Image (cartoon, rainbow, N blue to C red):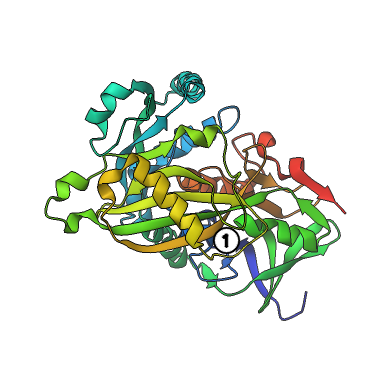
Amino acid sequence: MTPSARRFDALVVGGGYIGCSVASALAVAGLTTALLDRGPIPGGASRANYGNIQVQDAELDHSLPMVNAARRRFDGLEEELGRSVGYRRVGNLLLIETERQWALMAARVERLRAAGIAAEMVPAGRLAELEPLLDRRSLLGACYHTDEGQVSPFAFMAAYLQRGRRHGLALFPDNEVVSLDVQGDRVCGVETSGDDFSAGVVILAMGAWTPALGRALGCTWGSRHVHGQALVTESFSRRQSPSDGVLHNHLSSAAFFDSMHDGDPDAGASAVFAVSQTADGHFLLGEAGVITDDLGSGATLRGQAVVAREVLRFLPSIAGLRILRGWAAPVAFTDDGLPLLGPVAGLGGLFMAAAFKSTVVITPWVGDLVAEWVSTGRTSMDLTAFAPDRVIGHG
């Protein structure tokens, strides 16, 4: 680390949902804090996201208490942040096409209910009432949850950045972290493509870019990523009968819990149905995703074509809508479905927060959790199951 390194109490690496929340919470807690990203801020996969506050797809064995606690934060969040984030309540339908999926979803419903989350199994005959646009011919029914939601991704992240900057948060876009400054058994800062930075604590919220930084240390940080693709349409509200084009729920497929990401990596040709609608009527269509080493954000025509075909199986009435744009992003995950969340053993001052299954819902909660850890050296929730060490190797 050079003598001229910029000095802060805390460095947050990664300017997506989690990074913005964590950096804001640390600044509010009174720490001099810098938020860095390899590109723009806000950035990463969070710039290519529906903004869905998902609860029903939570990992059940360890993550459900975290998700359940986090979802309660949204009712008062706009008041807390001091500006609108486009928050609205929306239901969720997980569509079921096979007996296996029905059995999987029925078992999930029991666990969700036991945790105090309203969920029910809905037979196909009720789907016309719940979602008139839906073509129900291939469906046995759905798993229905009434209490999810949606935020505007950019407004959501901007609210955290605005709050953080009121408390002195410094932003450093276009500063790619290339290595950690390790002195003895402690991380003391980072080296970037621009300046060097020193700090008492470093929080990694880098998503799919996390393993590359681990390799610079000679470590294998065991998350992988999918190259996810999606599309957005023109607003249905521009049609003569806008009420005919309104979705009442988020729609996705129970196939998410069955099999995913087994398509052709070169074609991006594996898709699982996932559709939302923005408050102003645009349909968000997805998603194609395959496991890959590609960290790029380039969409493919074949990947987007398979998204469109899958969507039209269930929503044929939107076939005439124009596609405005498509996008792609690398999205991190772990093989056990659990995030990398907690301090990194053997490297004092380093905390990891990455590879969340559903990121939006836990964003406010993770910011508070990290601020608690930095301030007290511990957290009020047991993070053992999420410990980064479970997937970290050396050499």
Q: Quadrant of the N terminus?
A: bottom right
Q: Can residue 24 be seen from the camera position used here?
A: no
Extreme-left residue of the structure:
240
Residue receiving disc 1: 31
- Which quadrant holds residue 326? bottom left
Which residue is at a point 44% across and 36% down the rendered structure image? 253
**Residue 281, percent from left and from top:** 25, 53
**Residue 43, percent from left and from top:** 51, 64
Q: Can residue 355 be seen from the camera position used here?
A: yes
Q: Quadrant of the C terminus?
A: bottom right
> Would you place residue 317 above or below residue 175 in this image?
above
**Residue 236, percent from left and from top:** 22, 54
Pick whichever, 102 or 69, lies toward us: 102
Number of marks present in the image shown: 1
Pick whichever, 237 or 6, lies toward us: 237
Pick whichever, 281 or 51, lies toward us: 281
> Would you place residue 132 above or below residue 302 in this image?
above
Q: Is residue 207 left or right of residue 107?
A: right
Q: Is residue 62 left or right of residue 80?
A: right
Dot 1 falls on a residue whose secondary structure is loop
Q: Residues within 10 Å of mark 1 (few under 14, many from 20)?
A: many
Which residue is at a point 69% across and 35% down the rendered structure image? 384
Pick whichever, 37 or 316, lies toward us: 316
Extreme-bottom residue of the structure:
4
Which residue is at a point 48% across and 62% down the rendered structure image? 301
**Residue 291, percent from left and from top:** 63, 50
Give the residue type that dot 1 points to. Leu
Which residue is at a point 50% across and 68% down the rendered structure image? 41
